[in-house]
Amino acid sequence: MGYLTFGRLSTLSHVVCARHYAEQMRVSPLGGRRPTRAELADFEDGTVDDIACPDPWLLIVGVNPGLWTAAVNAPFAAPSNRFWPSLYEAGIMPHRVDAAAGLSASDESHMIRRGIG
């Protein structure tokens, strides 16, 4: 389950956060590839790094990440998940994000610059 929370936009804080966060981009435990069915069980009770910025205008909170999400360390990463297509269809993201092998540095930077955490 995930929640969307809307707040105030502070452009300067997002730029500062994007610069700071770019140095700490998430690392996929699988090195940027999709997990195999056999590997998924290894990620039971796995965690996912946050995409965090001060004063975001959109805060997305997900709980209990799925095995695929934990395997690639990217939020809502399973190919069947409708999260990323929904952000695109709603006009929040300018393109469809494919996080199935992990969230790209450019997609993550774009989210931070737009105040999405």
Image (spheres, grey):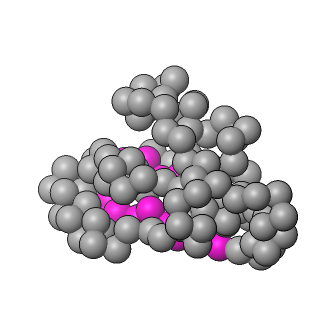
Q: Main secondary structure of the magenta part?
A: loop
**Side (left or right) of 4 relative to 38:** left
Is residue 56 a member of the stretch shown in magenta?
A: yes
- In the image, residue 107 lies at what x, y percent? 38, 47
The quadrant of the picture occupied by the C terminus is: bottom left
Q: How many marks?
A: 0
- In the image, residue 116 lies at what x, y percent? 40, 50
Q: Residue at x 79, y 75 (%)?
A: 42
Q: Residue at x 51, y 23 (%)?
A: 89
Q: Quadrant of residue 64?
A: bottom right
Q: Quadrant of residue 82?
A: top right
Closer-to-camera residue (103/1) = 103
- In the image, residue 112 lies at what x, y percent? 33, 54
Q: Residue at x 57, y 53 (%)?
A: 101
Q: Residue at x 42, y 53 (%)?
A: 104
Q: Which residues make up the magenta segment? A: 47-60
Seen as rendered, the residue at the extreme left is 12
Q: Is residue 99 visible?
A: yes
Q: Is residue 74 visible?
A: no
- In the image, residue 13 lies at what x, y percent? 21, 60
